[in-house]
Image: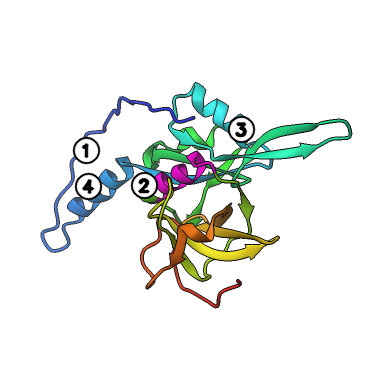
Amino acid sequence: MVTRTSRKIIGMKATSKVNPKTNQTGNLISIMAQQGQAHRYAGQTRSRNEKSVAKQMDKHDIEHFLPLYDKISRWKDRQVRLQLPLFPGYILVRVSLKDQINILQIPGMVRLVRFSGHPTVIAEAEIVALKRWLSAEVSIEPYPYLKSGQLVVVQSGSLAGLSGHFMRRKLANRIVISIDSIMRSFIAKVSLDDIEIAKKPRAFVPGQGELPESRV
């Protein structure tokens, strides 16, 4: 569930001398402005705490997105349909860095995913494409992160325009979709009639990248 929040930001008034050569005050203002902008980030949670963290974010009006997929669990006398996190241990949040303390104080949250010491921003286009996959009537499930593979593009149906890496698994055709910013992937069933090999690599939305040999 995605919720939105509006916050009242209280600023601090400060005075400083401007160095005309380095413009340090201008650089400081630029950094503060960037920290005040809300972006999408991946939050790491404790194991099996994804849903409880999402509920806490609902209560605190923190915008978030927890991708779930359906899985049939077979018990001795029946079958049960479960909704499980598509990316175990992760939840996607929209927050400004200056307000990240509000995220980290939630029970079950560990940290924002960082690369090179900085929280990694997730492109909005990746979120949009991910929601399209989840809303389509296709079977999906988590898959080990795959950065490369033979790239194909869906040409028809509700997923037209989306792309991923083609593979064959259990006599069925699948596409592996990778979210490079958090190094996580999932897999979806596709029909050969709906896809074709991409002509050349392009910016993935989500899952494009360098291409190794096909695993068909």
Regarding residue 183, the answer to whether it shows in the image is no
Report whether 150 appears left or right of 30. right
> Tag 2, which secondary structure?
helix
Dot 4 crowding, Cα within 10 Å, few <14, some 14–19, many 20+? few
**Where residue 124 is drawn, which disc sits there?**
2
Q: What's the mark number on residue 14?
A: 1
Identify the element where label 4 is drawn: helix
The residue under label 3 is 51
Q: Residue at x 54, y 56 (%)?
A: 191
| Residue type at numbered disc 4 | Ile
For numbered disc 3, what is the local secondary structure?
Answer: helix
Q: Nearer the viewer, mark 2 or mark 4?
A: 2
Residue 27 is at least partly visible in this image: yes
Q: Nearer the viewer, residue 132 or 10?
A: 132
Task: Find residue 29 and name its label.
Answer: 4
Q: Judge whether 195 appears above or below 90 on screen.
A: below
Label 1: few (<14), some or many (≥20) within 10 Å? few
Please state the extent of the stretch shown in magenta in the rendering: 126-137
Q: Earlier in the sequence, mark 2 or mark 3?
A: 3
* Disc number placed over residue 28 in the picture, else none: none
| Callout in the foreground (2, 1) | 2
Q: Amino acid at mark 1?
A: Ala
Residue at 21% over, 38% down: 14
